[in-house]
Amino acid sequence: MLRPLSTPGDLAESVYVELREAVIGGSLAPGSRLGQEDLAARFGISRQPVLQALSRLERDGLAVRADGRGTLQVAPLDPQLVEEFYQLRAEVDALAARLAAQRIRAGQARPLPASLIERGLSALRRGRMPALIAADTQLHRAIYEASGNRLLAAVMEPQWGHLERVMCAVLEPASVRAGLWDEHAAIIDAINAGSAERAARLARDHAVRAAAGLLPRLEQRTAA
């Protein structure tokens, strides 16, 4: 539910965050109209920050124009786009894990903390899907940071919204794939041990299995 904004800071940023969360969380459904005047009235602000926020959503691929023109609307859930994301992610995650392990072994980076795994297991026990998704993305971002390659995070950051949106749409805590966080723990252990090739292999296999579990659910939803 969108609400009036009272944040005195960057209004365009505040509107963007609010809209992005609404799209990812599903309160703004695929195909929902994103009219500037309507949104400005609902937020209680002028149209300019809304326009800036909508431009960012469009660049992110979370908003599209019907027939390529006209008023923006929430982008459809696209199984092909998610499949392409996982193809990219499998290779990027493998590279990030390999580089992180090498840097930790050389003393150039600190070992990844156990709290990355603990946070995810806690969310899983409590059955909180938003917290579980946040823990998942935090773990992978930590690996990108540990890799020391700034381009990896820059390449992947705009793509996470699509994955988080799909996970919110098709998963419940009870349906999270068995062994998911065991795999995360094994990847972190290999990275911290400096086992570069093992870490890369585990990270790639993890992404492939994640896609195999998520894509059929998304295809069933979009076909319904």
Image (cartoon, rainbow, N blue to C red):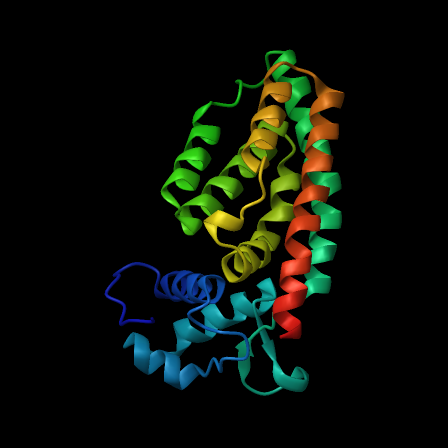
**Image quadrant occupied by the C terminus:** bottom right
**Image quadrant occupied by the N terminus:** bottom left
As drawn, 52 above or below 83 = below
As drawn, 134 above or below 161 = above
| Total number of numbered discs in the rendering | 0
Q: Is residue 32 left or right of residue 180?
A: left
Q: Position of residue 32 (x, y in %)?
A: 49, 80
Q: Position of residue 21 (x, y in %)?
A: 43, 61
Q: Position of residue 170 (x, y in %)?
A: 55, 60
Instruction: Please say whether residue 45 is visible from this viewpoint.
Output: no
Rendered image quadrant of residue 179: top right
Q: Is residue 16 left or right of residue 60?
A: left
Instruction: Please say whether residue 86 is visible from this viewpoint.
Output: yes
Depth order, front residue of 132/60: 132
Depth order, front residue of 5/178: 178
Rendered image quadrant of residue 60: bottom right
Q: Is residue 204 left or right of residue 57?
A: right
Point 57% across, 30% down: residue: 182
Point 60% across, 65% down: residue: 59
As drawn, 196 above or below 83 = above
Point 25% across, 61% down: residue: 8
Depth order, front residue of 167/88: 167
Point 53% across, 50% down: residue: 175
Q: Position of residue 9 (x, y in %)?
A: 30, 58
